[in-house]
Amino acid sequence: MKKISTGEDSTLGVYRSIALIISGDKDNKAVKFFDKIIKNSLNGEQTEVWAAEFQMMYLIFTLAFGDSKKEEENNAESI
């Protein structure tokens, strides 16, 4: 199995944990994204992720914080 830079296996469960640590919120969009994929995967959290680590981190950050940046921009425009 492929490993990520932390030495952990590249699995949906590991990336869900990273999303939770980064966002600090189990209801965050990034965490919920992984919850949904894990629920629909045959191997659940142990499903191997073949995408490059930098792509997965970009996905997590975009899901976790992407909407908040748009909200800030919209709030700034309304002032």
Image (tube, rainbow, N blue to C red):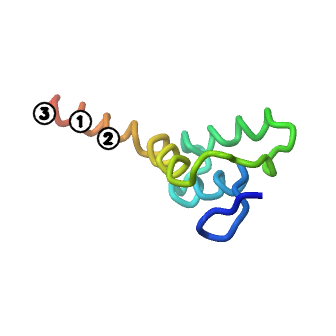
Instruction: Say if 41 sits above or below 21 in the image.
Output: above
Please name the residue shown 69% across and 56% down the image: 10
Q: Position of residue 51 (x, y in %)?
A: 61, 45
Choose between 46 and 73: the one closer to the eye: 46
Position of residue 16 in the picture relative to residue 23 (left or right): right
Q: Are marks 2 and 1 in contact (CB under 8 Å)?
A: yes
Name the residue tied to disc 3: 79
Q: Which residue is mark 2?
A: 69
Q: Viewer-nearest of labels 3 and 2?
A: 2
- Residue 14 sits above or below residue 42 on the image: below
Viewport quadrant of the C terminus? top left
The residue pinned by badge 1 equals 73
- Residue at the right extreme of this rendering: 42
Tell how many labels.
3
Q: Residue at x 55, y 44 (%)?
A: 28
The one nearer the camera, 19 or 55, is: 55
Location of residue 8 in the rendering, given as x and y in whole percent from the top left corner? 70, 66
- Real-space Cα separation, disc 3 to disc 2, in angstroms: 16 Å
Please state which amino acid type lies under the numbered disc 2. Answer: Lys
Among numbered discs 1 and 3, the one appearing first in the sequence: 1
